[in-house]
Image (cartoon, rainbow, N blue to C red):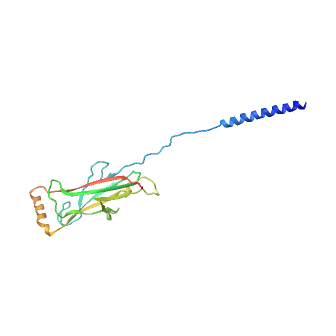
Amino acid sequence: MAKRTVKQIMCILVVFVIALYCIAGTYARYAGSASGVGEIQVAKWHIEVGGAHNEEDMTIKFNQVENDHVVDGKMAPNTEMYADILIDPTDTEVSIDYWFTLGAITGTEGEAKPQDLSVTKVCYLTPDKQDGENLLEQDGKYTGSILLKNEAQKGFTKDDQVTVRVYAKWVNNEEHNANDSEIARKTIEQEAPTYQIEVTAHCEQHIVV
């Protein structure tokens, strides 16, 4: 009787162990996995300089600084002209570095340039249309940046536009009166000469090394 009881107990233990193994195996098979595709959009890049997009020609117009003694839109000794270059980063989503260069002032038809006509100042224009900080020239380039506002981390809007003003002046130099007068006399005999200055601009993403 005792042996039979021992055998029964052993059988029960064997069954119990097998049951535990099966249960353990069942739990071991419970597993989970997941997969997906992470997405991130490319930051927008949309810059206009002087009303032009990438690789387009800018339109730059010089205006006369008010002078009661010279007809509006014309230049003569002792007159000053200015041109505004608008840098518009609206909708762009990265900080921007920009630079531009100013070429020599030349006549559109090869006319002789007044000896004392030259660029005198390049500066930022404030929101109330006043002269702001001067842009310093380095290696022939005027440089600046438009940086994202860290606290906002949003793309640029129209409020982030920057205007750079270029001044050119025909200085009155008594020693060059004869040459200046000769240029002016030609305007009576033929169409008045006009002068131009080439502006090359470049914008790129601001990268901190």
| Extreme residue toward the right, this view | 1
Left or right, residue 133 beside residue 174:
right
Residue 195 picture quarter = bottom left
User: How many numbered discs sit on the rendered protein?
Assistant: 0
Tell me residue 67's x, y (percent): 21, 66
Question: What residue is rendered at 72% in x and 35% in y?
Answer: 23
Residue 24 picture quarter = top right
Left or right, residue 74 beside residue 20:
left
Q: Which quarter of the rendering shows the N terminus?
A: top right
| Extreme residue toward the left, this view | 189
Question: What residue is rendered at 78% in x and 34% in y?
Answer: 16
| Extreme residue toward the bottom, this view | 174
Tell me residue 180's x, y (percent): 13, 64
Tell me residue 155's x, y (percent): 42, 52
Q: Which quarter of the rendering shows the C terminus?
A: bottom left
Question: What residue is rendered at 37% in x and 58% in y?
Answer: 145
Question: In the image shown, does 193 or 32 lie closer to the viewer?
Answer: 32
Left or right, residue 86 beside residue 34:
left
Residue 171 picture quarter = bottom left
Tell me residue 19's x, y (percent): 75, 33
Question: In the image shown, does 163 or 43 lie closer to the viewer?
Answer: 43
